[in-house]
Amino acid sequence: MNIDFKMCMDAKIRFEGIYTKELLCTLRSRVEDMRNQIHLLSAFALFLLITYLFAAEYVPSKQFVINLVVMLVCAVLPDILEPPTSRWHRAFFHSKRCLKCVLVLAIVGWAIGMQSKNYTLLFAAFGYLVHLLEDATTKAGLPR
């Protein structure tokens, strides 16, 4: 569902006998909130899976919490950088070029993690990748 911000502000919708501008704006914000919740839920599930499979020994530590927060923030970062209300939504930070950059960042994060046992950069890249891969499955897809 892609609703233009101007249309949201100017539209009057007849809903059960009541004209209202706010209905469309409310619907639009709920759709955006639902998208962010899906990105967060997917990132959280991936984080738990990765932690369970590869790093179960550090679960109750401070680094566990840091990596979780970083991954969740990075899962919604593309929409923070390019909000869905902006005409620039799905520009560079939602593009295939950015996806390639984040993949390189993931490889660098893995290499750093192998040396220092600090995988924060890798979890940041995974969070961002979750968002881009989910957006790639939509009708709009990812631009070049």
Image (tube, helix red, strand yellow):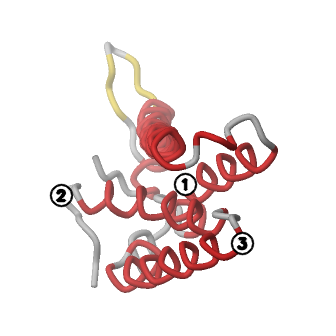
In the rendering, at what x and y percent does residue 5 appear?
46, 56
The residue that disc 1 covers is 76
- Marked residue nearer the N-terminal end (3 or 2): 3
In the rendering, at what x and y percent does residue 121 appear?
63, 69
- Marked residue nearer the N-terminal end (2 or 1): 1
Secondary structure of the residue carrying tag 1 is helix
Image quadrant where residue 15 sits: top left
**Count of marks overlaid on the render:** 3
Q: Tell me the kind of residue under disc 1.
A: Val
Q: Tell me the kind of residue under disc 3.
A: Ser
The residue that disc 2 covers is 139
Q: Residue at x 81, y 45 (%)?
A: 62
Q: Tell me the kind of residue under disc 2.
A: Lys
Secondary structure of the residue carrying tag 3 is helix
In the rendering, at what x and y percent does residue 39 appear?
45, 46
Residue 28 drawn above or below residue 10: above
The front one of 139 and 24 is 139
